[in-house]
Image (tube, coloured by chain):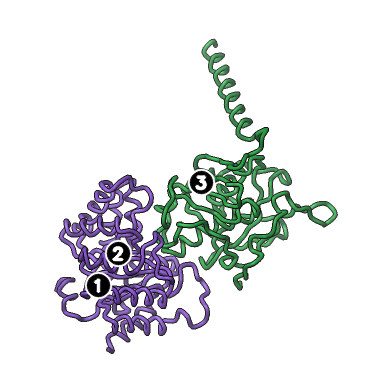
Chain colours: A green, B purple
Amino acid sequence: MQRAAKRFAAAIGIALVLFAIVVRVSRPSKNGPGPIARATGGEATPTATPIPAGKGRPAIVFFVDAEGQGLVARRTEVTPIADPSMQAKAILDAMVAGPAAMPPAKPGELVSESLPSIPAGTVVRAVFFDGKGTAIVDLVGLAERLGGGSDSEVLALWAVVDALAFNFPVDARRVRVLLDGREAESLGHVSLATPLSPRRDLVIGEVPSLAIPIANGQSEPIEEDDGPSPFDDLVPMAP
Amino acid sequence: MTFLERLASGLPILTDGGTGIERRRRKCGAADVHAAFVAAGVDVIVADSIAVAGLAVTDPARGAAALADAVAIARASGAPFVAASLGPSGPGVRDATHRRELYGALAAAAKEAGADVIFAETLLTFFDADAALDAARAAGLPIAVTFAFSREGKGYAGLQAERTAQWAQGCGPDAAGFNCGEDPEATLAAFERWIAALVPPRPWLTKSNSRPPGAFRPAAGTSTPERFAVIGAHAVALGARIVGGCCGATPDHLAALVARVRAG
């Protein structure tokens, strides 16, 4: 009986520590994220807890179309996080989890078949925003998991770049990609020597709006949607 | 006939095209792609191993095993020659010793697996080129070294086409040149700059894309097998002794190139 009580007390203690960590990570800093905001973390969890309808933060994620000929955008919801870097990491984690981990389509929502854009097992270790329009993302294990030649490199890289640019149009006008914590000259075929700009030409079809539907049939843009679309100047790819 | 004997014969050697992209397009394994390229008439099948150098950075044994598997699959295609493809080492290399160790392990694995030649491809730095060259020599395999360049004739890491020509002159790989880059015209332009700077000549190699990476819908007429073959045959006329394809170059592209080159 005494042993059981000790186990119960230990379990309560662990739960309290975990709760404190979660609160600490999720709580916005009194001073805001500062000029360089950073999020770090481990491997994405494909079986994330479902977010109750209407409680999530709208996000646009990019997967590969069923024919492997471009990217397709999909609107989803992720857990709202005040820190923009942690929020960005959560969005990229959802992409690593792949289309199979996406919530089922809502009635009337047209969702085309798609393939993962970022190989499973890739870790989004960190996202930074430099405050000058460049996001920096550190991807661990991407290069060794890619197959399919340079097209796969292009699709994986610009899935990340377009997702950050679309969800954070002011803070991620460009994206610098680090591999395994280091600056890299290339991913194999694609140069990483300079920050990458978003590419609408790789996206097949429309990109859903980030606006949140409200009761009267209108919609309300979310905070990050105030800036211009990163794709405004680019010609879309014909479907 | 060994690969070097064939190279010395002066007859153009035709390599295959973009295996990774073709695997993706056909949704099949490397063996099926190799078979399609062999049917197109190429002389060299390049093992689907360009990524193993990056893999070997963290796990040399795993990288060597993956290379051996890829060479075995290529060997089974029945092609006259099999090249082990080694790509850039990537950002995880700690220092020069580490780089030499990983290329050394891979070259030894290529020799053990029965490769006829090493193609060190899409290289961006002389660090990787030097290490791959030394590793191939230590393993007793011939080596062809190719660099990737943009349309402006610049490598991603800042290399100029002329500098790579000087490197080839000084270091003496069995063949050297370009692969990948952007499209056939861009690769040809870099190749022309390169041979203009190269005295005396040595066997040149060009393996061009049929289209830029990720250009899934190239402008009409820009990536046809016919256009690819015309440009490849022009490289042969300029002196290239090894010619083939890279990203987006399908068996149809290679069949057109083989027919045009062999027709003289």
Which image quadrant is residue B144 in? bottom left
As drawn, is A234 to the left or to the right of B137?
A: right
Helix, strand or loop at disc 1?
Answer: loop
Which residue is at the front of the view, B92 or A79? Answer: B92
As drawn, is A30 to the left or to the right of A153?
A: right
Q: Residue furthest right?
A: A216
**Disc 2 residue type (three-letter):** Ala
**Disc 1 residue type (three-letter):** Ala
Q: Which residue is mark 2?
A: B47
State the CA–CA distance, disc 3 to disc 1.
41 Å
**Relative to residue B33, is residue B71 depicted above or below?**
above
Callout in the foreground (3, 1): 3
**Relative to residue A216, is residue B231 depicted above or below?**
below
Helix, strand or loop at disc 2?
Answer: loop
State the CA–CA distance, disc 2 to disc 3.
30 Å
Discs 2 and 1 share one subunit: yes
**Disc 3 residue type (three-letter):** Val
State the CA–CA distance, disc 2 to disc 1.
11 Å
Q: Which residue is mark 3?
A: A124
